[in-house]
Amino acid sequence: MGGCFAFLVLYLLIERFLLNQKIRSIPLRICITGTRGKSSVTRLIAASLREAGFEVLAKTTGSKPSIILPDGREEEIRRGEIPSILEEKKLLRLGARLKINALVSELMSIRPESGYAESVQILRPHILVITNVRLDHLAQMGSSKEAIAQCFASSIPEKSTVFTPQEEFFPVFQKIADKLGSKVIQVPRDSFEEYFQAKKKFPFFELEENIRLALAVAEFLGINRQVAFRGIVKVKPDFGSLRAWSTEMGSPPRRFYFVNSFAANDPESTRLVLSNLLKKRIFEENNIIGFLNLRKDRGDRTLQWLEALRKGAFPEFKKFYLFGFNAFAFKRRVGLSDKASVTVLKKQTPEKIIEQILKEEKGEAVLVGMGNMGGMGKELVFYWENIGKPYDL
């Protein structure tokens, strides 16, 4: 028994030694955590570093987990099992083999103990970015924003620099950072004003706070703003990022717009996204219809949506189509008859769903994907990509 224990201790010491070697071989390590926007911020930061001449390896864990190689090529991460933070060891091994000088990784952890292990014990980032704090994953992270902020703070390493939007700052970030000898930088709304005056140059829609964070990190690293911006505008959006398509359908032909905001997930994040989008021309004089996807493993999120619709958080919507787990029970409980109609869609192909919409909707419309990307959400996005033309938001 004693011999087995000694062997285990020796194995762990060797494993730690080898991991430390790989960590030290990568001079700059950046991790991104938060509720929303992690994949986008990861891509934006990696692109600005790549444009500045860094050999960058990046990893996203969003709607389509991917490795972004130093030349910008992407390889989808194929998982045969439940995602594990041990993936980060493979990422470090790959980085060491490619002789990179910068690593940008989206953290996948939602529990505080996992966040600590993934960030502090494995990746040990010099820079940690906390994108925002929203009410989501309530069972794992807590039922208040303060509790969720505490979870994200568990990912702060010693002597690191933490970036967060000023409006998403929580005192617990500063408290933990002070204990660890780390520094918190709050990025204000009015920073990088010259970029936002020229935002039309950006080839796709991106939330202002995501770009603000990426530019702030680049500037902190001494990268010229114009160089960072050149890299950012070359970014290939994440599969789950906010995008739109347009097409004509029906007889006589009518214009329809499809908006993918499935990955916003929770009602608060979706509301913020739509508040930005409502300024766009496609929403003028068009019926706005929500496609709300409910996931079996996200019961707390379903309850959030139930409460949001009951309170009239989306008054612009004429109708909601529901699909996914417990959709009929959701309809019975939401009671929207005086505000907007609710229809449950049976499980069917995206083509059949659109056929049903064409029969029920007589005018032009904007169809907005909401709730969850998994399952039918992903199928609809693939379908919209195939039948529609990209629409510049």
Image (cartoon, rainbow, N blue to C red):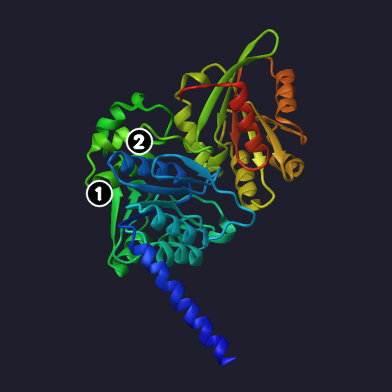
| Residue reaching furthest to the bottom | 2
Residue shown at the point (53%, 37%) measured from the top left: 239
Residue shown at the point (71%, 42%) measured from the top left: 324
The crowd level at tag 1 (other Cα within 10 Å; few <14, some 14-19, many 20+) is: few
Mark 2: secondary structure? helix
Residue shown at the point (60%, 33%) measured from the top left: 369
Q: Is residue 215 left or right of residue 2?
A: left
Q: Disc number at residue 60?
A: none
Q: Is residue 293 left or right of residue 124?
A: right
What's the amino acid at mark 1? Leu
Residue 146 horizontal/vertical position (percent): 45, 58
Image quadrant holding the N terminus, namely bottom right
Question: Is 18 above or below relative to 142?
Answer: below
Give the mark, 1 or 2, whose residue is nearer the N terminus.
Answer: 1
**Residue occupied by mark 2:** 232
Q: Disc number at residue 221?
A: 1
The crowd level at tag 2 (other Cα within 10 Å; few <14, some 14-19, many 20+) is: many
Residue 10 horizontal/vertical position (percent): 47, 81
